[in-house]
Image (cartoon, helix red, strand yellow):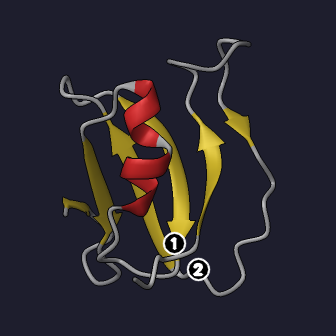
Amino acid sequence: MNMANYEITKWCKSISDSGKDEYTHKDCKGMPHKFRLLDDDGIVYCYGQCSSNQSFAPLKYTGEGYGCTSIEYKDKMTKLYKQL
């Protein structure tokens, strides 16, 4: 199994301890695909970058622990996020 590499780049204020958006300043070289993780109410918990725009790895290995139920990748043409 080839798991995509990913990094969380921003934790949203809705779940951060400080109550503010918190940037992680992680190195995202080789990870050109932007994503976000959301709960079933559509609240965004975090943003990140991934090596594949077809991977559920960020949702499975990070998002599920926070109650996230969906992952959306940013379309490079439309600049809109689309659910995977």
In the drawing, does residue 46 fall left or right of residue 83? right
Mark 2 and mark 1 in contact? Answer it, CB < 8 Å: yes
In the drawing, does residue 28 fall left or right of residue 38? right
Residue 27 % position (x, y) = 79, 69
Residue 31, which numbered label?
A: 2
Q: Which residue is at a point 33% across and 34% down the rendered structure image?
A: 68
Considering the numbered disc 2 on the image, is that residue within a helix, a strand or a loop? loop
Residue 18, which numbered label?
A: none
User: Relative to 21, does residue 9 appear above or below in the rendering?
Assistant: below
Mark 2 residue crowding within 10 angstroms, few (<14) / some (14–19) / many (20+): some
Residue hosting label 1? 50
User: Relative to 43, does residue 19 appear above or below in the rendering?
Assistant: above
Q: Which residue is at a point 19% across and 63% down the rendered structure image?
A: 84
Identity of the amino acid at label 1? Cys
Residue 1 % position (x, y) = 40, 83
**Of the pair 71 and 75, the residue shown nearer to us:** 71
Mark 1 residue crowding within 10 angstroms, few (<14) / some (14–19) / many (20+): many
Between discs 2 and 1, the one toward the N terminus:
2
User: Relative to 64, does residue 6 appear above or below in the rendering?
Assistant: below
Residue 18 % position (x, y) = 73, 13
Considering the numbered disc 1 on the image, is that residue within a helix, a strand or a loop? strand
Q: Which residue is at a point 55% across and 57% down the rendered structure image?
A: 48
Identity of the amino acid at label 2? Met
Residue 37 % position (x, y) = 38, 44
User: Relative to 41, does residue 27 appear above or below in the rendering?
Assistant: below
In this rendering, the count of numbered labels is: 2
Q: Which residue is at a point 35% across and 77% down the rendered structure image?
A: 53
